[in-house]
Amino acid sequence: MTADGSQCAQYEHSLVVTDDGPKILTSQDFTMDNKYLWTKESHAHND
């Protein structure tokens, strides 16, 4: 609860960056992770 009585929520995750790319260690649904993680492949520049 906030000072004015409103509801609130806080979410945190633990991440690790490996040679294979980033991983969310505290993930509850690994199939959803990829759309939230930036990888070399997902942000490659087209020259």
Image: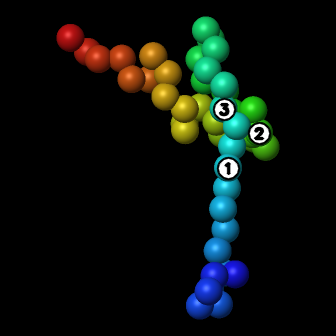
Q: Could you tell which of marks 2 and 3 lies nearer the N-terminus?
A: 3
Q: CA distance from mark 2 to mark 1?
A: 9 Å
Picture residue at 29% right of the left edge, 17% below the top: 45
Q: Residue at x 64, y 14 (%)?
A: 18
To which quarter of the image does residue 37 belong?
Answer: top right
Labels 2 & 1 near each other (Cβ < 8 A): yes
The answer to whether 14 is drawn above or below residue 42 in the figure is below
> From this viewpoint, which residue is outermost toward the bottom?
4
Kind of residue indicated by mark 3: Leu
Q: Which mark is residue 33?
A: none
Closer to the camera in the image, 14 or 29: 14
Q: Which residue is mark 2?
A: 26
**SS for tag 3?**
strand
Query: Going 70% across and 37% down the picture, which residue do you hit?
Result: 14
The secondary element bearing badge 1 is classed as: loop
Residue 7, position in %: x, y?
66, 81
Name the residue beneath numbered marker 1. 12
Assign a secondary structure to mark 2: loop
Looking at the image, which residue is at 66% across and 62% down?
Answer: 10
Indicate whether 46 appears above or below 31.
above
Quarter of the view holding residue 27: top right
Q: Which residue is the site of mark 3?
A: 15
Which quadrant is home to the N terminus?
bottom right
Q: CA distance from mark 1 to mark 3?
A: 10 Å
Going from the N terminus, do you reach mark 2 or mark 1 first?
1
Q: Amino acid at mark 1?
A: Glu
Q: Position of residue 2 (x, y in %)?
A: 63, 82
Observer able to see residue 42: yes
